[in-house]
Image: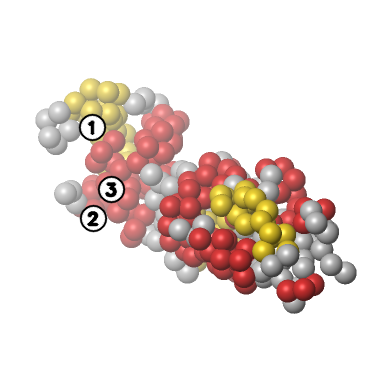
Amino acid sequence: MKATADVRQSPDFHDDGQDGHLIDPRGYFIHRYPEQIKKYGPVFFGSDIVWDRRQIFVTDALNDLTFAAILGTPCLGCQVVYFPSEAQWYCSDYRIDGAYFPTSEEKLGILISHYFIQCSQHCHKLAGKAVLMLRTPQTIKNVITTAKAMLEVEKSFFTGKDGHRRYVDGKFIEPTEEPSYQVFVKKAIIAEPQGKVTVHDAFHRYYQFCRDNQMTPLTRQEFKSLVSEVIRAIFNVGLRHDIIGDNNKQGHGWCGITYRQEFAECLGRN
């Protein structure tokens, strides 16, 4: 059966005259991700042209929202999320019991590029060429930027009884384990009436502590916020803005606490 004049009314977007190739590349995604497309709209924007007596949809723009939603869709046991507390992307993998492992924006870019290539290979040559023309570094960057906001997860995603397991540096991190910043405070800091600790120095030591113990560190901003909560709960001291650091300048920090001697000697100072 020949495709109808309006390819958008065709249930599969195919043209039997071209060996079943898609004459509308949107069809490649609509059967695979119908819920995402229903919510955010078509993956591609463009227009119909007539080529060799066939009406073909030629794309000229990408819907970043839809493509970002597709990136976060569980597929073959894999789901991508962004964890802002660590400024880190994670991807689940059924091969490690569904645990999430760290991944990079570069690898996400390869995955996005793969989507473009796969779609183009299922298309009429003219439609496929137009799809590949959208496969640029800037387009991929735009999708990743949009996905950061759309696929962001809360801290509870990896913590608590309902949290998800992670697999980092060859070992599993259970969601019920104490997070790295809590372990750091309990192991590294003690009460000392005359002591002081700056946020800058504490973060340096915390970061080294995570490296030594194969833990994924928080970002500096998240560290300041979360460690302040733990220090207040354990030592009943609040974050101040007038702590003199090693550079003789005032900054954020705490009075009434200091580092355990063995911990300070182990890490040293820069």
In the displayed structure, 187 sits above or below 251; it is below
Query: Can you identify the residue that label 3 sits on?
Result: 205
The residue at the point 73 percent across, 74 percent down is: 18
Q: Where does residue 79 sit, x and y in percent of width and height?
A: 62, 58
Question: Sequence-wise, which precedes: disc 2 or disc 3?
Answer: 3
The CA distance from mark 3 to mark 1 is 16 Å
Query: Can you identify the residue that label 1 sits on?
Result: 195
Query: Can you identify the residue that label 2 sits on?
Result: 266
Q: Quadrant of residue 150?
A: top right
Q: Amino acid at mark 2?
A: Cys
Horizontal side of residue 104 vs 191, given as left or right: right
Question: Sequence-wise, which precedes: disc 3 or disc 1?
Answer: 1
Q: Where does residue 208 sit, x and y in percent of width and height?
A: 30, 54
The total number of labels drawn is 3
The residue at the point 37 percent across, 37 percent down is: 221
The CA distance from mark 1 to mark 2 is 19 Å
- Tell us which disc is closer to us: 3 or 1: 3
Horizontal side of residue 122 vs 64, given as left or right: right
Q: Are marks 1 and 2 in contact (CB under 8 Å)?
A: no
Q: Residue furthest bottom?
A: 19
